[in-house]
């Protein structure tokens, strides 16, 4: 594989496993457009000497400057809420925004797999290895950890080591990036007729 | 795969967050800290005087309005246009050309991306491992890249799914005589959850 293709694949892999923050940015842009359009309309209306739609620009300015005369509780609560929303937005803009996906080592292409697919494949192998019904195996896969929950059928013990081995073998064979560790939990109480 | 400018997205979110944090924090501080409250009151009166005199001095002859207000409206309109362009630039990047080869003496060879897309789509439709599949082509840094997204049935190993798609891609390479870069996206989703479990190992 040439180096340019490698760089291309690295870029695609990174972009596919991280959020673009498009939704948030578009929502913010729409809010800004509405606010700007409203303020602009109010200014034009004031320039024409017509009555304001909601608030005249001179009143907006006066209340912003004279903030200290407004009721303290209301303004401070609104200010704190705005500051917290601002802080959340800053954190969202700087955090990596990982999506629930993993890369798989393949030769011909970049491959991204939803964690859900990995979990469903692990659930199938875990239920065979643990000798339980597929519906009684629950798997959740996160960035670095796959948690397998098995509820054995009453009277038929599930072999924890066998399940762990089967699940770990599967995870190794997928070649996930980053690698995922398996943790198997077997419920103490079985289910009748499961 | 799209050409969305992610840095611009994050920049917009960051700037909005910073403005909210500063404005909200300042308002809360002005209310809760007595010292800042006094300073705010004093400077508030000064600012009002200055703005009034500025608006008075910049009054346009004949119109009786300040040009500062007209400039504010113009800036708002420009900002709105920029934001609309920003929104409209999301999600682009599809291309209809898979191969453009001008190495021959007698002209240029162009292979439309629908050739590759339909060949792959046909090959993948026969496989019972997949509930659905979709092939599209994007230009990533001017290079056409195939995007093969498949929705697996419950329990299909992602490695097997990727191997099936890769074998189809290799067959396509043989057909086209060159390798097109490709992305394989293996997903689950609602249709996979309610669909039948696969019988394949």
Image (cartoon, coloured by chain):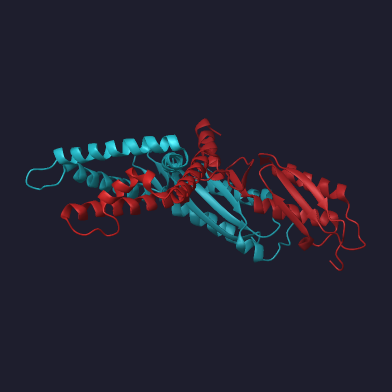
Chain colours: A red, B cyan
Horizontal placement of B142 versus A128: left or right? left
Which residue is at the front of the view, A2 or A29?
A: A29
Residue B64 image offset from top left, x and y in percent? 11, 47
Residue A33 image offset from top left, x and y in percent? 34, 51
> Could you say which quadrant of the image residue A124 lies in?
bottom right
Residue A90 image offset from top left, x and y in percent? 49, 40
Specify whether residue B113 is in view: yes
Which residue is at the front of the view, A55 or A101?
A: A55
Specify whether residue B94 is in view: no
Q: Residue at x 36, y 50 (%)?
A: A32
Which residue is at the front of the view, B78 or B167?
A: B78
Residue B198 image offset from top left, x and y in percent? 71, 62
Horizontal placement of B123 versus B65: left or right? right
Q: Residue furthest bottom?
A: A193
Quadrant where the C terminus of chain A is found in the figure: bottom right
Q: Residue at x 23, y 38 (%)?
A: B49
Residue A54, placed above or below residue B180: below
Q: Residue furthest left?
A: B62
Quadrant where the N terminus of chain A is found in the figure: top right
Q: Residue furthest top?
A: A3
Q: Residue furthest right?
A: A155
Q: Residue at x 72, y 54 (%)?
A: A121
Q: How many marks?
A: 0
Q: Residue at x 29, y 39 (%)?
A: B45
């Amino acid at each position: 594989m040439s180096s340019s293709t490698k760089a291309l694949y690295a870029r695609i892999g990174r972009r596919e496993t991280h959020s673009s923050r498009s939704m948030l940015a578009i929502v913010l842009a729409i809010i800004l457009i509405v606010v700007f359009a409203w303020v602009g309309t109010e200014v034009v209306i004031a320039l024409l000497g017509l009555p304001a739609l909601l608030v005249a620009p001179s009143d907006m300015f006066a209340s912003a400057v004279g903030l200290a005369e407004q009721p303290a509780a209301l303004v401070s609560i609104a200010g704190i809420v705005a500051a917290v929303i601002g802080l959340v937005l800053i954190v969202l803009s700087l955090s990596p925004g990982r999506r629930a996906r993993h890369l798989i080592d393949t030769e011909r292409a970049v491959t991204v797999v939803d964690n859900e697919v990995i979990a469903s494949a692990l659930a199938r192998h875990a239920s065979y290895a643990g000798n339980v019904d597929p519906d009684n195996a629950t798997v959740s896969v996160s960035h670095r950890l796959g948690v397998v929950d098995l509820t054995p059928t009453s009277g038929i013990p599930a072999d924890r080591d066998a399940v762990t081995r089967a699940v770990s073998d599967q995870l190794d064979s997928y070649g996930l990036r980053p690698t995922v560790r398996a943790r198997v939990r077997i419920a103490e109480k079985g289910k009748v007729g499961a | 795969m799209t050409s969305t400018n992610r840095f611009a997205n994050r920049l917009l979110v960051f700037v909005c967050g910073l403005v909210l944090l500063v404005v909200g924090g300042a308002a809360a501080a002005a209310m809760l800290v007595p010292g800042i409250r006094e300073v705010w009151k004093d400077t508030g009166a000064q600012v009002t005087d200055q703005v009034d005199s500025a608006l008075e001095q910049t009054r346009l002859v004949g119109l009786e309005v300040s040009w500062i207000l007209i400039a504010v409206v113009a800036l708002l309109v420009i900002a709105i246009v920029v934001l609309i362009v920003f929104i409209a630039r999301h999600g682009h990047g599809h291309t209809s050309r898979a191969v453009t080869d001008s190495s021959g003496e007698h002209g240029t060879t162009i292979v439309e991306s629908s050739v590759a897309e339909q060949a792959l789509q046909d090959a993948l439709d026969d496989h019972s491992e997949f509930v659905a599949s979709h092939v599209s082509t994007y230009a990533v840094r001017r290079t056409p890249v195939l995007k093969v997204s498949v929705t697996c049935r419950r329990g299909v190993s992602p490695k097997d799914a990727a191997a099936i798609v890769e074998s189809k891609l290799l067959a396509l390479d043989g057909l086209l005589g060159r390798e097109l870069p490709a992305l394989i996206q293996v997903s689950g989703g609602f249709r996979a959850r309610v669909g039948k479990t696969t019988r394949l190992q």
